[in-house]
Amino acid sequence: MNYYLRRTLRIPATILAVATLTFGLIRLLPGGPFTQLRIQLLQRGVPAEQVNARIEVLQNIRPDAPLWQQYIDYIIGVVQLDLGQSISLGKPVIDVLARALPWTVFLVVTSTILMFVIGVLIGALQAYYEGSRFDQFASGGSIFLMSVPYYIFAVLGLFFLAFQWGWLPTGNASARSIEAGFTVAYLKSVLYHGALPIAAFTIGGIGSTALNMRGNSIQVLGEEFVEVARLRGLSDNRIATSYVAKNAILPMYTGLLLQVGFRLGGTVVLEEIFSYPGLGYYLIQAVNANDYPLMMGCFLVITVTLVVAVYIADLTYGLIDPRISAGDSNAY
Amino acid sequence: MPTDADANASSDDLDWRSAASEEEVSTRDRLAEFYRRSVREPALVAWSDNRTRAGIVILSAYVAMALVDVFGLWRDASPNQSTERLLAPFQSLKYPLGTTQSGVDLLALIIDSTPFILLMVLAGGVWATSLAVFVGTISGYKGGRVDTVITSISDFFMAVPGLPLVIVLAITLSPENPLLLGVILTINYWAGLGRSIRSQVLSIREESYVEASRTMGTGTLRIIRKDVLPNIMPYVMVNFVLAARYTIFASVGLYFIGVLPYSGQNWGVTLNNAYSQGGLFTMQALHWLLVPIVAIVGLAFGLILLSQGMDRIFNPRVRTRFSGESESVEETDDETTTGLM
């Protein structure tokens, strides 16, 4: 079978598997959300005979049906984008998530690109001036950056830049007074509010990217083909871009796929700190409010986003690395 | 006994067959040899590197803090310990790191949670790396159907975002035991790591000496143990540290946003309290934020320094010249260490 076709078919398979996992968490774990939802409804004074009906509305599962029936109901609901009703917000889960998703994607994509570009540039410079004062300083700095979690930058940024000096906003994705839409004022407000979270998330990843790039470049610089290129009299620019940079970045690109995954999970903490209305923020809201339908919905959507992101990255990998052509790429 | 004589003769003629000559060595000599090769030389190589040295010193400080707590050498943290609230650090000998808004001794808070954090980090690192090594070597070396099955499973776990999964699990399981918590935090960390170990094993498998072992009929387990594992060991050690770092970052982050259940205090909870009880609004409260931050960053920094230097212990080329002449590598890291501590 064609690689791209196989790779595409794997998406629905993975999503089905994850949906099954969320179903299992709701339904099967002892003392899990489903049981707790029942207790919670009873405590709220919902009459016992109505509890099942309420659960059915909230979670699109019929609690009295056999397990396989419940599973099929749940999966059909997911396929129809019906993730149940949020208890705390009183809205369909899918509506809440549809508004939250773009913010999370905005944060992750912007900061990951920035992190990658800045890290690669620093690492390349370090490798080029290996052993120099700059290299030593940057290596030390990278090691230090690697040992600071991104939310520390977020907290310190919030403390100094937002609360003490008042340069940047303390939360939200845009100013409330400005109407959403493609207006200059709105976009400016979005960037202004996104600056701190994005900066915190970017700085946290620069260290390891730079160290990786430095190592790879130094290795490539020592290879024979670079020497040959030099002997052939190719220009420095040509050597730097199409010989060294290309071969040093390629192995990092696969690592980037994993990074996207960790970073998507990481937005939970980031968005909570900045009250940034993305998926992670709603996940925590849901957790604090015992809002299980919303919680499971967030989990599912974060996973689907991740699966799609990795898929896109996988496909573009073939475009960047000619060695990986269709069919052969999952051999290693 | 012709075989014995043969062995002796061959060991005299061809000293590359060291397996034969080892039979003659007494147990005591062998122990001494073992000590020299596995303990003393690595230790010397490790100590000769500034990064490892700094890493070991930092980590020992944490272990010392854990011991202080276990033997009860410093008072436990409790509210209203000091009449002075938000006392700045380094002002009084009684409260070296200052106090919180409710007058809790910050040093006591930090020390109290060290054993918990160390256990959790150890559990997370050991679980994630050993599972990854197991899965990666088996699937890389065996190939075929085994590989397909393992790869599909780890693909699935790679597709599930770590922290949200941990949050959902934390709700259902409420883990308060540090060991269990460490395992849950890295519940799907092994998948990505196993994947990259697998690709390393794939290339090692093609090496001529592995090929040779295989043609000689050596068993799979022995090949993996003798030929494959030593080659990926540096990579594994570095990744053990990265997994440990991930465990710290994830746990503190989740405690910080108040998702994990907790019975006592720990660095993340302290940070959370500082953050949510007004620590952000005044400069006087800065140390309340900074003390747990320094504790977290220090531990991660020690681990990373150790891993950076660890490469050298396992790298055979460096190990042969163990006597410390390989000092030329970077001296920078000393500066960063002093800068931090």
Image (tube, coloured by chain):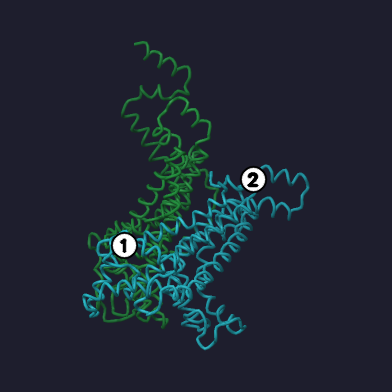
Chain colours: A cyan, B green
Q: In this view, does B216 lie above or below A102?
A: above
Q: Mark 1 lies on which chain?
A: B
Q: Looking at this view, is A219 or A134 the one in front? A: A219
Q: Is residue A181 above or below residue B266?
A: below
Residue bearing the label numbered 2: A222
Q: How many marks?
A: 2
Chain holding disc 2? A
Q: Where is residue A10 in the image (x, y as percent from the top left)?
A: 49, 54
Identify which residue is drawn at 33% across, 67% down: A61
Q: Where is residue A71 in the image (x, y as percent from the top left)?
A: 34, 61
Judged from this view, the residue extending furthest toward the right is A233
- Mark drawn on residue B114: 1
Give the quadrant of the C terminus of chain B: bottom left
Whether callout 1 and callout 2 share a subunit is answered no
Q: Which amino acid does label 2 sit on?
A: Gly
Q: How crowded is mark 1: few (under 14 residues within 10 Å), some or many (20 or more)?
A: many
Q: To which quarter of the image does residue A94 belong?
A: bottom left
Q: What element carries label 1?
A: helix
Question: x, y percentage for residue A247?
Answer: 63, 50
